[in-house]
Amino acid sequence: MRFDELPISVEVKRGVADLGFTEMFPIQERAIPLLLEGRDVIGQAKTGTGKTAAFAIPMIERLDWSLKEVQGLVLTPTRELALQVAGEINALARYTPLMASAIYGGVSLRRQIDELRSGVQIVVGTPGRLIDHLNRGTLRLRAVDIVVLDEADRMLDMGFIDDIEYILRRVPRRRQMSLWSATIDARTRRLSRRYMPRAEMVIVSRDEIAVEEIDQRYLRVSPYEKPETLKRLIGHLGIGRAIIFCRTRRGVEALTRRLRRDGYDAEALHGGFTQARREAVLRAFRERRLSLLVATEVAARGLDIEDVPYIINYDIPRDPLMYFHRIGRTARAGGRGTAITLVSYGEEVELSRIKALTSTRIKRMVLPPDFLL
């Protein structure tokens, strides 16, 4: 189905066309008509499948363009995702009077208060900062008609359940809701049953695991040979841009020091960074002034970085679902990418758990003289 076939306004269609969107992704084709009808929706799809447009287009279409109050509310786990979602909403709504504002912690409240007072109709924010504004009286939700919980599983992973419920209790009972998650587990089911019991389920992928567009490979290595194997891998494949995942902050710091010492353009990213340093590293990577980003998965959650051709799991994750969160950083929005995992001897159990969750083949590879088995 094409976007120009949707029963939406000319203004929204122009915004869609400006972004180069023509044919819908599966999540969009199934969810948008339901949301345009005012139905509640639970959408299960991995990051990068077009889910932001899936909830943003119906929201823009259904809100009252003449009312200068907050009518749409989107909750996100991280500031990076809040900025990305608000940016996409504003791009889609550029030919309408609607404006979206990103509200998140770590920055001054003053500019956010000024934006809220200016009459923005859509607020995209992280739970903690939204509650801060609610308690100060600078954010009012009395006119909210549509609520979106984006990457709900990650918000729950980060301990936001009480904050989410606090916010949901302060929006009108008569409102449309959608919940978007890579995995629909017991926690997301409880949340949806409580606040959207008649929701339609839209499942496009099995968990976050329909990753046919990602070329998945693994290398068996000795733990002591991992640093040298990584460097040989980078050289053999000519990897010029990649995110490399380690399990711990200490591992991230140690690997980054080693790579930099050996002449590689690498920077670390983990939860111990100040917000300013985190933003500087991410900006350098997005702007291609940095080749290798060495990160923990917690630090990389919610990132939306385009055109990352390689994901390297330097440490295989203990939680098999985390593997799919990690490799979802590549092959964004229909593109292709490669994910390579270094598997130390004794970690076959972790690899088997990952293989059991996906129908796609994870191919074994070896470095020269043979390459792919």
Image: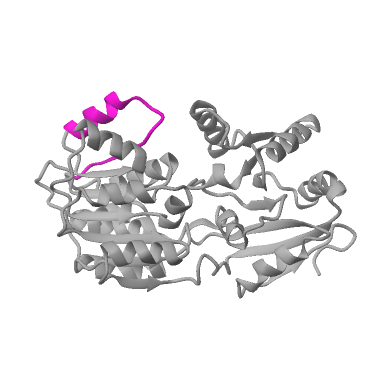
Indicate whether 263 appears above or below 75.
Answer: above
Quadrant where the C terminus sits is: bottom right
Residue found farthest to the front: 162
Q: Position of residue 350 (x, y in %)?
A: 71, 63
> Of residues 200 and 212, which is closer to you in this image?
200
**Residue at image coords 32%, 68%:** 31
Please state the extent of the stretch shown in magenta in the rendering: 98-117
Would residue 133 be seen by someone viewing this image from the given angle?
yes
Find residue 238 and report its horizontal and vertical position in percent.
Answer: 75, 48
Quadrant occupied by the N terminus:
bottom left
> Which residue is outermost to the bottom?
359
Indicate whether residue 147 is drawn in magenta: no
Q: Position of residue 303 (x, y in %)?
A: 50, 45
Taking the image as shown, residue 304 lies to the left or right of residue 39, namely: right
Is 186 rendered above or below residue 127? Answer: below
Q: Let me know if residue 108 is in the magenta part.
A: yes
- Quadrant of residue 81 in the image? top left
Residue 336 % position (x, y): 58, 60
| Side of 13 where 246 appears, left or right | right
Q: Nearest the camera: 81 or 169? A: 169
How was this image coloured? Answer: one colour
The residue lying toward the viewer, choosing from 335 and 266, is 266
- Residue plotted at (83% across, 62% down): 371
Who's the residue at 65% across and 34% down the image?
Answer: 267
Q: Residue at x 19, y 33 (%)?
A: 137
- Name above or below for residue 259 compared with residue 337: above
Q: Is residue 102 visible?
A: no
Give the total number of marks visible in the rendering: 0
